[in-house]
Image (cartoon, rainbow, N blue to C red):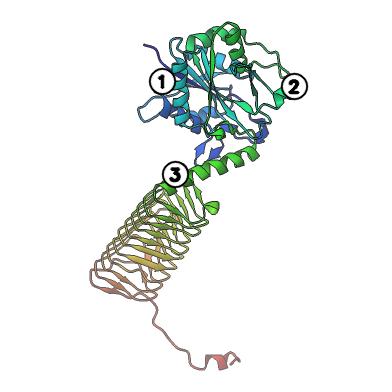
Amino acid sequence: MSSDTVVILAAGRGTRMRSATPKLAHELCGRPLLAWPLEAARAATQGRIVVVVGPGDGLRDTLEGWCDHSGRALELAIQPEPRGTADAVAAAADLIDRDGVAMVLAGDVPLVGPDVLRELLQAHRASGAAATMLTAVLADPRGYGRVVRDDAGDFVRVVETKAAGDADERELAIAEVNTGIFAFDGGALLDLLPAVGVENAQRERYLPEALAILRKRGERVATLAASDPAVVLGVNDRADLAVVRAEAQRRIHERHMLAGVTIVQPSSTTIDVSVEIGEDSVIEGCSQLLGTTRVGRGATVGPHSTLIDALIGDGVGVLHSHLERCEVRDGAQVGPFAHLRPGALLREGAKVGTFVEVKNSDIGAGSKVPHLSYIGDADIGEQSNIGAGSITANYDGVDKHRTTIGARVHGGVHTSFVAPVSVGDDAWTAAGTVVTGDVPPGALAVARARQRNVERYGERRGTR
């Protein structure tokens, strides 16, 4: 049974990024650059996915463990030297099925989507051609290979424009460009790859030359014009990455807004591609929703809030706060200026207020930690109130310990809970208390020095 193959070219050195990180491992809206075409290929076809990498380029760490939802893993091919796109495809030749369709695309063109790849695959099968090239018409085609056609409008060849002398003035005036995305009959591609030469200024083997060879052999080469010219936006340096990021972010915003989300100030709002947001939620300006963050319906985030891998329920409010790897359930309120660290859980209707930090703690339904407090490694029952300036002293210099505070507890201001300690349901703590022992249910804990006034103290010091 024949199988389609998607070959993603990722062996370029990316020296213009000026980075110790491989170019395709650089982040774009929550994914490495290479993950974008990988995800598009995964969604577009059930065939095998092959990534061509260079030896020792560090991309294997980025790709390690990647598989789609069905468990389909990608396969790697090694291009020993960066000798052009045709040479890169040749490195994957053993993994291409002669009887299937082979799609080829670059790893540094992240805005290609699954719809484009599906359309190319369908157009290729319908055309009966040996190869089909995706093209785009650009207002400014500088830097791209131009598509040369004959008087009948049929494809003739691609003229590269990377160096002076590659193309003449007439060819440079052509606005239709090669996107670097192709579909080939597998057998035709494998048969012609050895014939692709190095007749260009860079002395490299370019894949578009394979199309000209097919045409000379009497085979038909078809083209498909992309409706979205952004598919050609590639990344060679950090300036390119900024351009692509702006377009990717615009698309992410548009997708959420069309799904019923209000983004008050898109120009100052960052939302990663994997973020989920429910209807009627509002994202205020200068906010960042990153990683695998999920926001429910009718929530308000921001302004000036950062959520990283956070789970936010329906109707939650997050104001001027930083949340990471935590969960805030329906109706809870956070901020302003709160910090929820990993492992924090706010149950339904709970509140964490101004300048409060919570780490690895469970705040019960309806409970409040309103002001200026640190809650770490603690469990607080429902409907409790922790007074301003309170802390859980969870670290003894060697180990971390937990604090357990029951339901309906009334904590006085400036209470210190020295873990391990337990406070029973309906208990109270007096202001300024240092709790070092368990407090029974319903009891009042008072642990502070009794006030003593020293009369005429100022006179004795010689001051008034």
> Could you tell me if the residues under marks 3 and 1 are in contact, i.e. CB atoms within 8 Å?
no
* SS for callout 2: loop
Task: Tell me the amino acid under the disc marked 2.
Answer: Asp
- Mark 2 and mark 3: Cα distance apart in space: 42 Å
Q: Nearer the viewer, mark 2 or mark 1?
A: 2
- Mark 3 and mark 1: Cα distance apart in space: 28 Å
Q: Earlier in the sequence, mark 2 or mark 1?
A: 1
Mark carried by residue 168 = 2
- Mark 2 and mark 1: Cα distance apart in space: 40 Å
Please state, as top left, top right, bottom left or bottom right, where the C terminus lies in the image.
Answer: bottom right
Residue 37 position, x and y percent, is 50, 30
How packed is label 2: few (under 14 Cα within 10 Å), some, or many (20 or more)?
Answer: few
Mark carried by residue 255 = 3
Is residue 64 visible in the rendered structure shown here? no
**Residue that extends furthest to the front in the rendered view of this protein:** 152
Q: Nearer the viewer, residue 266 or 355?
A: 266
Q: Is 142 situated left or right of 346 in this image?
A: right
Up the image or down, 113 lies above or below 47; here it is: below
Is residue 6 visible in the rendered structure shown here? yes
Q: For residue 171, which quarter of the picture?
A: top right
Task: Tell me the amino acid under the disc marked 3.
Answer: Arg
Up the image or down, 376 lies above or below 172; here it is: below
Q: Which residue is mark 1?
A: 47
How packed is label 3: few (under 14 Cα within 10 Å), some, or many (20 or more)?
Answer: few
Q: Nearer the viewer, residue 404 or 353?
A: 353
Q: Is 269 situated left or right of 414 in this image?
A: right
Please state, as top left, top right, bottom left or bottom right, where the N terminus lies in the image.
Answer: top left
Residue drawn at 57 percent across, 44 percent down: 246
Q: Earlier in the sequence, mark 3 or mark 1?
A: 1
* SS for callout 1: loop
